[in-house]
Amino acid sequence: MPSSVSAGPRIRLGKRDGGSFQMACGVLIALSGALAAFIFNAVYARGWIDLEVYREGGAAVLQRTSVYDLIVGENRLKFTYSPFAAMLFTPLALVGMEVSVALWVLISILALEAVIWILIGRTAVKSRSRRTTHTLLVVIAILPLYPVTLTLWNGQIGIILLLAIIVDLTHGKKKWRGIGTGIVAGIKLTPLIFIPYLLVTRRFRAALMAGLGFLGTVILGFLLLPADSRDYWGGAFFDTQRVVAGQDADFFNQSLRGMLMLMTGSWPAVPLWLALCAVVGTGGLLVAAWTAKKAGELAGITACAIVGLLVSPVSWPHHWVWCIPLLVLWAQRAQRVDVTLEKVGVGVLWFIFFLPGYIALATLLIYPSHAGMWLMSLTGSYVLSGFLALLALAVYFGRIDWRQRRHGLGDA
């Protein structure tokens, strides 16, 4: 006799449901980070020193006082960004520090997740559920890295700008591509390196749009904050002493200039630095263009950003958030070619961006008398990694082109 009792509906979690669950986990990570930051700042009022400078810059705009006369906090930090950036930071001045910290950390972690989502989508991961899973796992692996942690701890803007540049140059509408990067450069000058990159890659319209976007931020600054704009563009933007505060700060300057300034002796540091910038800047941009042609736009953008970090007068560890696409793109390649040595290389690079920064910071805070040449070698690991990455790309693509030409001649 057939049973008249229904078995009832079966509940199955499809791929979309799984993806939605993992996306919810990503949002939960961001919310948890924001809540932890809110509580820590409310209890201890420590950290987020750069965010405090942003808030004070925004407050100065609202109060119509000079942005570049500010001296903020016990570290006596100064506002080093453009007048346009100060205008963008005005909303932060309208809420309390704890709320600003929570919102900033939340937005930064969501931006990190968006960057990794875009990078993961570069591979052949077609399933949304798998892509979300991979994104979540990579976020967990990336969060402990020193540049990322320091960005969140200081309340820095680096991850947000990283996302804006990647979206603009890879996902923006073609006729407007570049304008977002120009606006980003109007906030923080270092992304100006992407204008010559676009020229070298023969994307003249995008380079023009980037230039116009940057020029628009300058004009807007002069219209709304004329006195501050005169101060900034009259020389404050070029004054590295406004950025480097304290005797030990140079230990953390992860640029060619930072490494040269730490070397003792009678070296002609400035002429040598300018010569190195000319060589590394020109050669690096050519390598970045080559990389974009051979390995795709995301790889080219990352190589260009590394060039900018090397030649910049000051590149703090948190500026090296470009290690995120560098690591993810190399990990994707290592998985694709399935070469053990490359997988080990990814692990070594992750370790470099994880441990040395914490060791250097702990040494300077706890045992400052022990800071010496060995510490310089730790803090210089980012510079060496960036330089070797560019060199490896040049050698790799050079060998490919040489083989292709050789085979072409042989066929002829």
Image (spheres, rainbow, N blue to C red):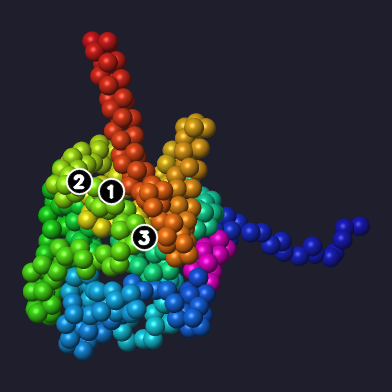
| Amino acid type of the residue that numbered disc 2 sits on in the rendered structure | Trp
The answer to whether residue 398 is above or below residue 77 is above
Circle 3 or circle 1, nearest the eye: 1
Determine the CA span between mark 1 and mark 2: 8 Å
* Of marks 3 and 2, the one in the foreground: 2
State the residue at coordinates (23%, 64%): 188
Q: Position of residue 210 (x, y in %)?
A: 16, 57
Residue 117 horizontal side relative to residue 288, left or right = right
**Residue under numbered circle 2:** 267
Of all residues, the one furthest to the bottom in this rendering is: 63
Residue hosting label 1? 263
| Element on which disc 2 rests | loop
Q: Nearer the viewer, residue 76 or 41?
A: 76
Asked if residue 22 is among those painted magenta in the image, a careful observer would answer yes
Bin the neighbour count of mark 3 within 10 Å (Cα to Cα): few under 14, some 14-19, many 20 and up. many
Question: Which amino acid, by three-letter code, is at mark 1?
Answer: Met
| Quadrant, the C terminus | top left
Look at 33% across and 67% down and name the residue there: 157
- What is the magenta range? 20-32
- The residue nearer to you, when weighing 101 against 53, is 53
Question: Pointers 1 and 2 in contact (CB under 8 A)?
Answer: yes
Which residue lies under the disc numbered 3? 318
Identify which residue, 168 or 40, lies in the foreground.
Answer: 40
Q: State which quadrant residue 165 falls in.
A: bottom left
The residues bearing labels 3 and 1 have C-alpha atoms spaced at a distance of: 22 Å
Q: Of callouts 3 and 2, which one flags the residue occurring earlier in the amino acid sequence?
A: 2
Of callouts 3 and 1, which one flags the residue occurring earlier in the amino acid sequence?
1
Which is the main secondary structure of the residues drawn in magenta?
A: helix
**Is disc 3 placed on a helix, strand or loop?**
helix
State the image quarter where residue 192 is shown.
bottom left
In three-dimensional space, the C-alpha distance between marks 3 and 2, rounded to whole angstroms, equals 28 Å
Q: What's under tag 3, amino acid-wise?
A: His
